[in-house]
Image: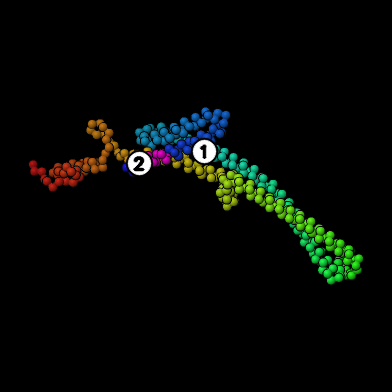
């Protein structure tokens, strides 16, 4: 029972694969000729069905058909397989271009955000440097005031000047307060810039995580980075490998299904009444055995009715 069921499983798999290839091929070819999409779809669908029939016909009647018909049908099947593969290629490329277009938009959005983030980082570095300088100045002034002596570096001469003048202390105290105020302003700017950069990072993360296109091409993008090749090149090679397996595999499965049916049904031959009957293995072996016996001229052995292959022990006496 299992042996008889298996050819049907192979046939179903072959037809499913062939129908899938036909659908994608018809859809892809109709995209190329969108002005007459319906007419092209009907034509391509008819050719797909004819291709399967031609492949089956070649397998079953290969020995009976003439040489020219073999060449033509084989060539036609190969060309139709190429057309099917071309249609599948067009379908997959069209699907990838849609995804790639969405991905390009996302990459541009991320690029704009990254530019803003870069400018904010430059400002953040500048303000951080300014804050460090203000902190150093505040430390020096605070240290001098706490010792009732004020030391500062003269901008013109570059000399360190020490003073205990109250007037000078008052001026420097005012300067110290100004430095603290500036530091507070700079700190607020740094905090604001840090918050802005964090918001931009979250915005990029939200765009990439909520994008279906980014998720779909994620594995291909990883392969592209791994091979150090452009994404389009990796996708193109992947599609080419895919299409050269798709339709040829369907044809091979279809031929295999026909072959499996032949094996299950067994060989047939024409009997003396002109009827086509199935040849059983034991009958075929018995017939060959009797031919050998006849050729040797041995007619003294009889065979049991139960087993035609085993000679009986009874010897005929004429």
Q: Label 1: which residue? A: 88
Q: Residues within 10 Å of mark 2 (few under 14, many from 20)?
A: few
Q: Is residue 13 magenta?
A: yes
From the image, which quarter does the N terminus lie in? top left
- Measuring from the top left, give residue 95's x and y in whole percent: 56, 40
Q: Which residue is depicted at the point 26% across and 39% down?
A: 279
- Toward the viewer: 228 or 41? 41
Q: Residue furthest bottom?
A: 147
Relative to 70, residue 157 above or below: below
Q: Mark 2 or mark 1: which is in front?
A: 2
From the image, which quarter does the C terminus lie in? top left
Q: Which residue is depicted at the point 58% across and 47% down?
A: 215
Using residue 130 as the reference point, say whether residue 111 is left or right of it: left
Which structural element holds mark 1?
Answer: helix
Q: Is residue 292 magenta?
A: no
The earlier-in-sequence mark between 2 and 1 is: 2
Q: Residues within 10 Å of mark 1 (few under 14, many from 20)?
A: many
Q: Label 2: which residue? A: 5
Q: Which residue is depicted at the point 83% across and 66% down?
A: 141
Using residue 308 as the reference point, say whether residue 318 is left or right of it: left
Would residue 76 be seen by someone viewing this image from the given angle? no
- Measuring from the top left, give residue 64's x and y in whole percent: 35, 33
Relative to 61, residue 148 above or below: below
- Measuring from the top left, give residue 133's x and y in whole percent: 79, 62
Q: Main secondary structure of the magenta part?
A: helix
Magenta span of residues? 6-14
Marks 2 and 1 sit apart, C-alpha to C-alpha, by 31 Å
- Identify the image quadrant of residue 51: top left
Using residue 138 as the reference point, say whether residue 245 is left or right of it: left
Which structural element holds mark 2?
Answer: helix
Relative to 174, residue 36 above or below: above
């Amino acid at each position: 029972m299992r042996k008889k069921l298996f050819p049907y499983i192979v046939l179903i798999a072959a037809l499913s694969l062939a129908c899938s290839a036909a659908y994608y091929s018809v859809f892809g070819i109709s995209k190329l000729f969108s002005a007459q999409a319906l007419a092209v779809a009907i034509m391509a669908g008819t050719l797909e069905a004819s291709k399967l029939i031609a492949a089956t016909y070649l397998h079953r009647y290969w020995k009976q058909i003439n040489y020219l018909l073999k060449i033509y049908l084989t060539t036609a099947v190969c060309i139709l397989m190429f057309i099917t593969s071309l249609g599948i290629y067009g379908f997959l490329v069209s699907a990838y271009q849609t995804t790639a277009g969405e991905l390009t938009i996302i990459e541009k959005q991320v690029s704009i955000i990254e530019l803003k983030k870069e400018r904010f980082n430059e400002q953040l570095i500048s303000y951080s440097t300014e804050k460090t300088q203000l902190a150093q100045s505040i430390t020096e002034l605070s240290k001098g005031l706490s010792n009732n002596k004020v030391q500062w570096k003269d901008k013109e001469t570059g000399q360190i000047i020490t003073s205990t003048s109250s007037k000078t202390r008052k001026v420097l105290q005012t300067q110290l307060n100004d430095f603290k105020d500036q530091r507070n302003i700079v700190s607020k700017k740094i905090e604001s810039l840090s918050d802005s950069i964090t918001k931009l990072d979250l915005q990029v993360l939200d765009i990439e995580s909520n994008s279906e296109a980014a998720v779909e091409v994620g594995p291909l993008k990883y392969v592209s980075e791994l091979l150090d090749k452009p994404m389009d090149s990796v996708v193109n090679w992947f599609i080419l490998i895919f299409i050269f397996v798709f339709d040829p595999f369907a044809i091979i499965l279809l031929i295999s299904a026909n072959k499996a049916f032949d094996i299950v049904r067994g060989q047939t031959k024409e009997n003396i009444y002109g009827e086509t009957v199935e040849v059983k293995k034991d009958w075929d072996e018995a017939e060959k055995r009797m031919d050998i016996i006849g050729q040797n001229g041995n007619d003294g052995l009889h065979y049991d009715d139960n087993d035609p292959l085993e000679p009986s022990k009874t010897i005929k006496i004429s």
